Image (cartoon, rainbow, N blue to C red):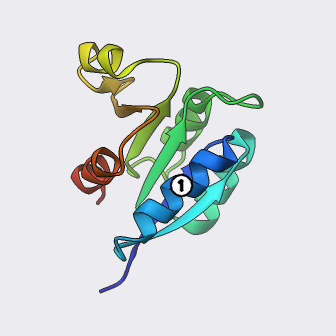
Amino acid sequence: MDKKKILLIDNDKDFADVVKMALEATEKYEVTVENKGANGFVVARAMKPDLILLDIVMPDMEGSAVAAQMKDDESLKDVPVIFLTAALTREEVETQGRVIGGHPIIAKPVSKEDLISCVEKNIS
């Protein structure tokens, strides 16, 4: 079975490394990491991921702006996006119904089990 491709866009390199290792350990996913929000769109167009994990708060470009670019792009508009954020607590995410801007959202820090569960629910 071919592995699903996931693009992780997050400026926190340590967090990105942990997420990449956790997802790739399932042997179901191949994870590409981009640490600059502004480069996320270009990388997404080049790799055509099955799912994008996208940090909301990044110094160079907000995740919501990256998601908007993708939504306007014919080749990326149907790729599921899961937002990641340390700006909200788990409780705040729950009160939002685990969705923001029409996308699932995960509060950092996230357990490996919760991360994998959310990815499995949303990946195409």
Q: Is residue 98 above or below residue 119?
A: above
94 relative to 12, above or below? above
Asked if one can make out residue 9 in the rendered structure from this viewpoint, the answer is no
**Vertical arrangement, residue 32 with respect to residue 36, above or below:** below
Q: Position of residue 8 (x, y in %)?
A: 55, 52
In the rendered structure, which amino acid carries the disc numbered 1?
Val
Residue lying at 42% horizontally and 43% vertically, measured from the top left: 81
Q: Which sits in the foreground, 92 or 34?
A: 92
Extreme residue toward the right, this view? 60
In the rendered image, which residue does mark 1 sit on? 18
Q: Nearer the viewer, residue 107 or 122?
A: 107
SS state under label 1:
helix
Is the C terminus in the top left, top right, bottom left or bottom right quadrant? bottom left
**81 lies left or right of 55:** left
Q: Residue at x 69, y 41 (%)?
A: 11
In the image, is 48 to the left or to the right of 58? left
Position of residue 48 relative to residue 100, above or below, is below
Tell me which residue sits at (54%, 47%) in the image. Answer: 73
Pinpoint residue 47: horizontal percent, then vertical percent.
58, 67
- Who's the residue at 34% across and 14% down the image? 92
Quarter containing the N terminus: bottom left
Residue 69, can we see it?
Answer: yes
- Mark 1 nearby-residue class (10 Å; few <14, some 14–19, many ≥20): few
* Number of marks in picture: 1
